[in-house]
Image (cartoon, rainbow, N blue to C red):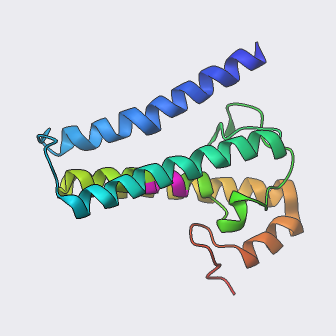
Amino acid sequence: MKHFRNIIGYLLGGLMFVVLLPAIMWLVSGMPQLEHIGAWRASCTGLLIIGGLALSVWTIVYMKRRGKGNPMDAFDHEIGARTQHLMTEQPYRINRNPMLTGTLMYLAGFVVWLWTWQALLAWFLFFAIMFVQVLTEEKRLRRDFGDEYEAYCRRTGRFLPFSLRK
């Protein structure tokens, strides 16, 4: 049953972030025709979408293998098994939230593709909601991992490859 729940969680998460959010961006943009957008925008779109998906998938795989848990934790409510180890290597060397960074990159690709203020506004709203989630998650990580997490925060940025707290 636990294995089935994990699979359902990953599928629902994937559908929400990979399908639903871009669809919402397209809808709020007035459902524009997805015609040829020019080489520059197409290149940026492709790099952001592929790079963002790659970073997110890498993070999920690493989280499952090293952390022995999954990302199913929303606003301090455990949805799936939480990670048992503080993860600071591989994608977590880039920043403390590489999965979210990947998702934001992926969605930024759709902003570039759609090129509307509505898509950009949807991206910022998603970021604002996720930023609150990250702050909630950081409180839990401080409780769970204490000084080890504080040291990690000093050397690694929340979303950037460096910390602004130095």
- 14 in the magenta segment: no
Please give left or right for residue 45 compared with residue 14 in the image: left
The span shown in magenta is 101-105
How far from the left and from the top, in percent, is residue 160?
57, 72
At a point 86% along the width and 50% down the height, the residue shown is 85
Q: Give 35 or 114, whichever is nearer the viewer.
A: 35
Q: Quadrant of the N terminus?
A: top right
Which residue appears farthest toward the top when viewing the image?
1
At a point 77% along the width and 18% down the height, the residue shown is 2
Name the image quarter holding residue 97: bottom right
Which residue appears farthest toward the front when viewing the image?
39
Q: Quadrant of the C terminus?
A: bottom right
Name the image quarter holding residue 16: top left
Q: Give 46 or 30, whichever is nearer the viewer.
A: 46
In the rendered view, tell whether residue 124 sits above or below residue 50.
below
Residue 142 seen from this side: yes
Secondary structure mainly formed by the magenta segment: helix
Please give left or right for residue 129 compared with residue 146 in the image: left
How far from the left and from the top, in percent, is residue 137?
67, 53
Total marks in image: 0
